[in-house]
Amino acid sequence: MFTTTVHFGPGHPLADVARRHCDAHRPPLARIVACGACWELAIRDDERFAVECGLPRELTPDPNYVDEIAVDLACRGERVELTRAEFTAAVVRLHGRGMTPSAISKRLHASFLAVLAAFPAELIGAAA
């Protein structure tokens, strides 16, 4: 038995773009993500944009970047994937609103210990 790796699956950075292209001409149940032509269109458009704007081919994400929209959603109680920096920003924001660490852990769908670990050193005394 052999297995293959799916390179163009739902986790691909251009999957949503390819899916939107494909939605225009195929029903969603007829495919996993998108057809080959729509994948090619998404990839070519992405490459063209990178060349026209002088962007590097590979980007290195900044680990300290905070997506404020993701933090807003998390602070509203929605389940979103947060980086460590975003989680800390959410904890600080909710603590600033007067929430206890226990309430913050419930709001962020995280453990109490994860919330305490995310508190900046200057807030540790204020968290108790």
Image (cartoon, rainbow, N blue to C red):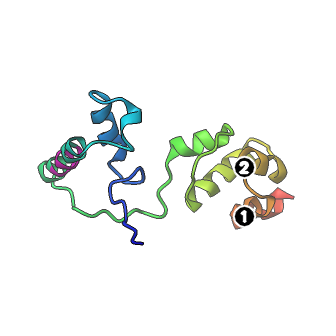
Q: Which label's residue is closer to the chain start, 1 or 2?
A: 2
- Answer with left or right where residue 103 lies relative to residue 49: right
Residue shown at 39%/71% (left/top)? 2
Mark 1 vs 2: CB contact within 8 A:
no
Residue at the spot of label 2? 109
Which residue is located at x 82 percent, y 63 percent? 125
Give the side of residue 36 with respect to residue 32, left or right: left
Label at residue 60: none
Locate residue 63, reporting x and y percent.
47, 64
- The CA span between labels 1 and 2 is 24 Å
97 over 115 or under it: above or below: above
Q: Which residues are magenta?
A: 42-47
Instruction: Tell whether position 119 is magenta.
Output: no
Q: Residue furthest right?
A: 128
Dominant SS type (magenta) = helix
Mark 1 residue crowding within 10 angstroms, few (<14) / some (14–19) / many (20+) = few
Which residue is rendered at x = 76% and y = 48% of the image?
Answer: 104
Mark 2, other Cα within 10 Å: few <14 / some 14–19 / many ≥20? some
Q: Position of residue 120 (x, y in %)?
A: 69, 63
Across and down, in percent, residue 10 comes to 41, 49
Q: Quick one: quadrant of the C terminus?
A: bottom right
Q: Circle 1 sits on which residue?
A: 122
Q: Residue 59 at x, y = what percent?
A: 31, 62
